Image (cartoon, coloured by chain):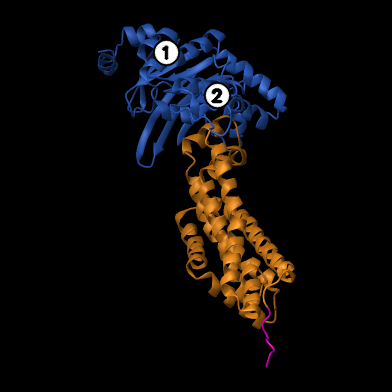
Chain colours: A orange, B blue
Amino acid sequence: MGFSLFTPLSWNDTGFILTGILNTVYISVVAIVIGTILGVIVGFFRAESNKYINMLIGSVLDVLRSVPLIIQLILFTTYIGAMGYPLDPFIAGSIILSLYTMAFMSEVFRAGFNSVQPSMITAARSLGMTYWQTVRYVRLPIGLRAVFPSWLGVALSVIKDSALVSVIGYMELLRTSEQLISRTQQPLEILIGVGIFYFIISYPLSLYGKHVERKMAI
Amino acid sequence: MIKIQGVHKSFGDLEVLKGIDLEVKKGEVVSIIGGSGSGKSTLLYCINAIENIQKGKIIVDDIDVHAKATNQDKLRQKLGMVFQQWNSFPHYTVLENAALAPQVVLKMSKEEAMEVAKKELIHVGLGDKLDQYPMRMSGGQQQRLAIARALAMKPEYMLFDEVTSALDPELVGEVLDTLRLLRDDGMTMITVTHEIAFAREVSDKVAFFHQGVIEELGTPEQVIENPQKERTQQFLSKVLH
């Protein structure tokens, strides 16, 4: 035949790979930011509310945490689509990945808020600070610092979990590489390369985390 | 003036204060002594509106502490309080610890708040620690920071809840010296304390609490040197050896 469907990896693929990397960074940042904000709010609410409300919120979070992310992504996209609201893969992926992140973050932050001694709060209130001033200047900063390492752990795993968003068609790093593999038939080189890229994305965050921790360990 | 009238306070079924009457005039130093569980600390918490009460009234300068209409956050600006645990804010330097409330609550500018805080910190002998983080300081130093932090709000009354109980013995002196300093400044103070010798030395009035009531009240000479009630005598003989 002398004709092949397969063409080897070349420099022309750089732009394609770069798009994949940027899309991975993009959806990860969105999920971490939204998941953190929602996580702080839900975590604080859980730290402040009674047993019954907590059980209710807890059971919703348990579902989000216990059902594999890949199933949540497929179910959500399929059902939303079937109901007549087809969502862009980025939007659908961001929603699910953010909620999934929030479920883990809220537990992290709840532990943080609970780690602030009640006597510390009483002392702040006795200075005339209102409830919200105490939250803003004492509980938040102390609670957030206490759980920074756990927060970082969740954030790093979100970057890796973002690879699963490829199943709903979002063109992130893994999906980019799958397409390249099917064209080039060079899975080994490409997957090693992609692995290195994930490492390059995650490692600076991990380094930054260590730096921040050192700075906070006064 | 602080007026405590017939105050009853319960935690669930446990009645901790069973009708307390006490008056503290401007400039007075009143010490409350008594065994653990006698309700001494609870009374301070009630005065500062940290705890509510079931019966009676506490009036601070004509403000009914537990009345519904009372803004308790505002009331607490009048009442500085220092606790057994110093509760330094670990994420702020010594200076920032003392400047926080003036800035946030009294809405002072940052510079103004820092100035006020610095003055109080120098007053309690922490002038050389301003930029340190409290975690690096001894308990005695952190307790003095707690005092300066409360003083920076320019309170009219100071409430001290067993402020030396959690300290190593060799650090008690520096904190008591700080309290003496405040007395000499003319600060109105209520101190709950186990330091009987200190109470005798600084107080205008001493109240001996026993099981939620004031068993004996009078000058230090009356209550500590010549106690009339048997329970006071028993308590003092135990703590004075």
Residue B107 falls left or right of residue B90: right
Callout 1: residue from which chain? B
How crowded pointer 1 is (Cα within 10 Å; few <14, some 14-19, many 20+) is rated as some
Q: Which quadrant: the C terminus of chain B?
A: top left
**Residue at horizontal 45 percent and vertical 37 percent from the top:** B54
Task: Pick whichever, B59 or B44, lies toward us.
Answer: B44
The answer to whether residue A6 is magenta is yes
Alpha-carbon span between mark 1 and mark 2: 21 Å
Judge whether residue A73 can be spotted in this image: yes
Place of residue A65 in the rendered image (x, y in percent of width and height, measured from the top left): 50, 65
Task: Pick whichever, A159 or B169, lies toward us.
Answer: A159
Discs 1/2, front:
1
- Extent of the magenta region: A1-7
Task: Pick whichever, A109 or B229, lies toward us.
Answer: A109
Callout 2: residue from which chain? B
Judge whether residue B50 can be spotted in this image: no
**Residue at horizontal 59 percent and vertical 25 percent from the top:** B98
For badge 2, the amino acid type reads Gly
Say which quarter of the image contains residue A84. Answer: bottom right
For badge 1, the amino acid type reads Gly
The answer to whether residue A59 is magenta is no
Place of residue A64 in the rendered image (x, y in percent of width and height, measured from the top left): 52, 66
Q: What element carries label 1?
A: helix
Q: Earlier in the sequence, mark 1 or mark 2?
A: 2
Which residue is disc 1 drawn over?
A: B173
Instruction: Look at the numbered discs 1 and 2 and tell me whether their residues touch, using CB distance below 8 Å.
Output: no
Q: Which quadrant: the N terminus of chain B?
A: top right
Which residue is disc 2 drawn over?
A: B80
Residue A170 falls left or right of residue B67: right
How crowded pointer 2 is (Cα within 10 Å; few <14, some 14-19, many 20+) is rated as many
